[in-house]
Amino acid sequence: DAKTTQPPSMDCAEGRAANLPCNHSTISGNEYVYWYRQIHSQGPQYIIHGLKNNETNEMASLIITEDRKSSTLILPHATLRDTAVYYCIVRVHTGANSKLTFGKGITLSVRP
Amino acid sequence: EAQVTQNPRYLITVTGKKLTVTCSQNMNHEYMSWYRQDPGLGLRQIYYSMNVEVTDKGDVPEGYKVSRKEKRNFPLILESPSPNQTSLYFCASSLRIMNTEAFFGQGTRLTVV
C-alpha cells in the first residue's frame, strides 16, 4: 500500500485559501490520489481525486507534483464550514477490493 | 437525492444480543463496504461486496457478518456483540471498484454494554 503523510493540523483565516499538503512518495503509477473530509463524526465526504494532472471541481483544486510524490489540496475561499479532518488517500486496488485506507488526516481549523 | 442510508443512527445494546445495522443506497452502485472508526485507529474496513451475492472480508471481519441479496442493501450483522465492537460504523458505496468516488452513510454509533 502506498502510504500518505500529512501534518496533523493547520489553520487558516476565513475567506483565504487553504493549502493542505500530502506526501505519498511510494505511490505507484496506476494509483490515484483521493481527498475526503470528515466533519465532526459525520460520514466522510468525497472531495476530489486525480492521477497526475491537476484537477478542479466546485469544491477544490488538486495539484499533483510531476513526480507524483506529493500533492496539495486547495480550498480557494475557506469558510467556517470547511473546518474538518481532511484525509489524503492513495486508492489501493487489491484483487477484487479497492478499499480506502484512512490515516490520521489533517485537522483544518478555519478561524473567523 | 443520491444517498446512503444507515439505520439506526444510535444503538445501545447488551452483550450477546444479535443486532443488524441496515445500509441502503439508491444509486445502483455495485461496490459497497462497511467500515468502523475508533479513536486513534482511523477507519478500518470490515467487509465489502463487489455485487449481489459477492462479499468478502476486509481488515477486521471477526465478529461480523454481511449479506448482499439485493444490489441496494448491504446489512451488517453482529450475531453476538461484545463490548470491543463498540464503535462508529459507516457504510459506503461506489459505482465501480476503481477510481470512483465513495458515498458514505451518516454513521451508526453502537455501544455494547
Image: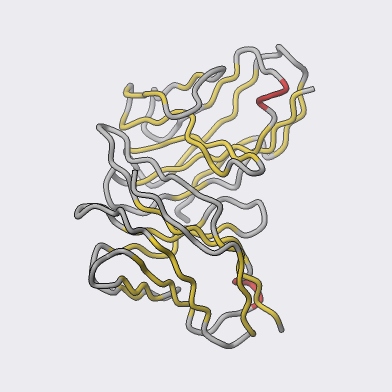
Between B13 and B38, the one nearer to me in the picture: B38
**Among the 4 quarters of the image, the one containing residue A39:** bottom right
Residue furthest toward the front?
A: A25
Between A84 and B93, the one nearer to me in the picture: A84
Residue A15: x %, y % from top left: 59, 88
Up/down of B43 relative to A55, above or below: above
Residue A93: x %, y % from top left: 28, 41
B26 to the left or right of A9: left
Give the quarter of the figure containing the C terminus of chain B.
top right
Residue at 61% in and 66% down: A9
Residue B92: x %, y % from top left: 46, 42
Up/down of B29 relative to A84, above or below: above
Residue furthest toward the left?
A: A29
Q: How many marks?
A: 0
B82 to the left or right of B46: right
**Among the 4 quarters of the image, the one containing residue A84:** bottom right
Q: How is the image coloured?
A: secondary structure
Residue at 49% in and 23% down: B61
Residue B66: x %, y % from top left: 47, 22
Residue furthest toward the bottom?
A: A15
Up/down of A96 relative to A81, above or below: above
Residue at 31% in and 31% down: B51
